[in-house]
Image (cartoon, rainbow, N blue to C red):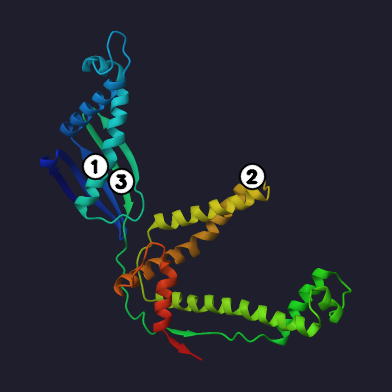
Amino acid sequence: MKNLECSLKEEGRTMKLEVKEVNDVQRELQFEIPSERIAQSMDEAYKNIGKKAKIKGFRPGKVPRKILEENYTADARDEVLRKLVPKVYHEGIEQEKLEPIAMPDIDDVSFKEDTITFKATVDIKPDIKIDGYKGIKVKRKSTEVTEEEINKTLDYFKASAGEGKEVDDNFAKSMGYPSLEDFKKSLVKQLEVDKDKHNRADIENQVAEALLKKVKFTVPKSLVKNEIEHRISHQKEQWNKQGMATDEMQKKEESLRVELQEPTERNVKVFLTLNKIAELEKIEIKENDNVYFKVMEFLLKEAKWEG
């Protein structure tokens, strides 16, 4: 832990700050805001309250400070906390030259007598070291469709059409094709497109796995948590549309949360690694660009293709 006392009086700012390194990607900041700064903020708070305060016998903006203190102390303290805590937090981040990657967790907020203290826990960008990402070995599977795959697909159509249905020209016509041969040709094209998509995903997975073997860093918990919450929120919308009961939904949510933990952590690790490569290679990432696809495109151009 290192202790820092920041006194920026020329800007009207004073605070005490202790920074604790929880792990590679998390910092715990303990703030103490001294009396002189709080007094200034309380003055501003009472001025704002005085403009709107309705006290019998006084016009708005003309209520004496003592009367305001008797009636609006809690409001003034709330306003000071609401404005001062985030402001001081950002000053601390700036002072420490930290790069938060998510909103901080603010807790242990205390406003006793003339001192405010609070703790901010924040995840920062991990320090990723990687090389050897050019020339990753990849192998693309064949898109050739086998007779077995065609027959399995025909069986699926047959089953959906009802038992006892013969797979012949009449069956093909019922599916909207002149003959069974035409239907099979169409199936082959569809299966090739599906296999092509799966093969592309498989190649990207080969690259991702190779990258994960080359890096070692702590994944920020906040990124994993946010991604899991996003996916669960989307899934709950689907469950609601299906009319799922609340208790059943809660059980499924708990199970899904556990199920998503490991793959989400992996995906976040891959994403951060790709971002680092984009930075190292100076790959231009525009506002609407997909970082994953843009960097993956670069890596596949640089890959060593086998087979």
Q: Earlier in the sequence, mark 3 or mark 1?
A: 1
Judging by the rendered image, the residue that carries numbered circle 1 is: 88
Crowding near pointer 1: few (<14 within 10 Å), some, many (20+)? some
Of circles 3 and 1, which is in front?
Answer: 1
Look at label 1 and name its amino acid.
Val
Residue 7: where, in percent of width, then height? Answer: 13, 43
Q: Nearer the viewer, residue 159 or 257?
A: 159
Q: Earlier in the sequence, mark 1 or mark 2?
A: 1
| CB contact under 8 Å: marks 3 and 1 | no
Asked if one can make out residue 110 in the rendered structure from this viewpoint, the answer is no
CA–CA distance between discs 1 and 2? 43 Å
Q: Residue at x 87, y 71 (%)?
A: 163
CA–CA distance between discs 3 and 1? 11 Å
Judging by the rendered image, the residue that carries numbered circle 2 is: 247
Residue 138: where, in percent of width, then height? Answer: 47, 84
Residue 22: where, in percent of width, then height? Answer: 30, 55
Q: Is residue 196 left or right of residue 216?
A: right
Look at label 2 and name its amino acid.
Asp
Crowding near pointer 2: few (<14 within 10 Å), some, many (20+)? few
Crowding near pointer 3: few (<14 within 10 Å), some, many (20+)? many
Q: Quadrant of residue 42?
A: top left
Q: Furthest-left residue in view? A: 10
Q: Furthest-top residue in view? A: 57
Q: Earlier in the sequence, mark 2 or mark 3?
A: 3
Look at label 3 and name its amino acid.
Ala
Q: Secondary structure at mark 3?
A: strand
Q: Residue at x 77, y 78 (%)?
A: 154
CA–CA distance between discs 2 and 3? 35 Å
Judging by the rendered image, the residue that carries numbered circle 3 is: 120
Residue 304 vertical placement versus 299 (above, below)? below
Of circles 1 and 2, which is in front?
Answer: 1
Asked if one can make out residue 137 in the rendered structure from this viewpoint, the answer is yes
